[in-house]
Amino acid sequence: MLGAFVSLGRIFLDVVFPRICCGCDERIIEPRRIVCSQCERTMRPLRLPLCPRCGAENSPAAAGEKCRSCPGGEIFFQAVRSFTVYEGPAVAILERLKYRARPQYADYLAPLMVRALKSLYRDVAFDAMIPVPLHRTRQRERGYNQAELIARSMTRATGIPLLANAIRRVRPTPSQTHLDRRARAKNVRDAFLVSDPALIAGKTLLMIDDVCTTCATLNECARVLRASGAEMVCGLTFCRASLD
Ligand SMILES: [Zn+2]
Ligand SMILES: [Zn+2]
């Protein structure tokens, strides 16, 4: 009975507020979607071979080597992997999630991220997930941290605990958009602090973020986590952007 009401409610909402696909702007008929199934199929996985370290696609790097997308300087994470490339509907989804007040989109991304986690990190048992934090000024403006919402939803699906406040962004950093690899690494240097090293020590951790390009931010988070005694730190992002 309740189910029928919920379905009726959904049909009613769809009539009054039709849901429009982020990718093609057509109306979506399938329930609980923000892109239509056709657009969802265009969100492709990264092309192999991946850089063993940063997970960039089409990488010629061998184990122990860096590729041209790897962060500058020393690398502190074990690996970073991404669900899809930063193009097509994925760009529109993240733009709406971050800049057009659609926090609920995190619940759509989380199952896709869980799928990526299970296939790309099938041999790793993570003790906890850590969302990449925003500076408090940015978080106040936005009202939420999209990485935290994604991680929170992934926690519910996987049972992997969430350490939402394990690291803090103590320095606001300008947008990385127009910076090259070296400048990105410098831009985030010393931007993060571990709040409680006791939570981190000896743990195998998975950092969660919406997008990465040179992994400079993830690398800086990994640096402070490792300095606080983390055993191993990996990263998973929804999208992978490239510098060119
Ligand atoms: Zn579509
Ligand atoms: Zn790389």
Image (cartoon, rainbow, N blue to C red):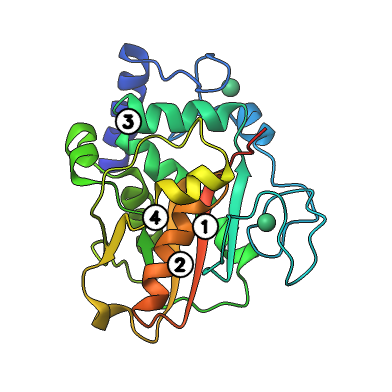
Residue at coordinates 43% horizontally, 27% vertically from top-left? 95
Amino acid beneath label 2:
Leu
Residue occupying the point 48% across, 60% down: 219
Q: Quadrant of ligand 1?
A: top right
Mark earlier in primary sequence (1, 3):
3
**Alpha carbon separation for disc pair 3 and 2:** 24 Å
The amino acid at mark 1 is: Leu
Q: Which residue is mark 1?
A: 236
Look at mark 3 in the image and give the residue it sits on. 102
Residue 174 can be seen in this image: yes
- Tell which circle, 4 or 3, labels the residue nearer the N-terminal end: 3
The residue drawn where x is 62% and y is 26% is: 88
Q: Are marks 2 and 4 in contact (CB under 8 Å)?
A: no
Q: CA distance from mark 1 to mark 2?
A: 7 Å
Q: How many marks?
A: 4
**Residue highlighted by disc 4:** 189
Pointer 4 or 1: first along the chain: 4
Q: Quadrant of residue 155?
A: bottom left
Residue 98 drawn at (x, y percent) = 36, 32
Numbered mark located on residue 206 in the image: 2
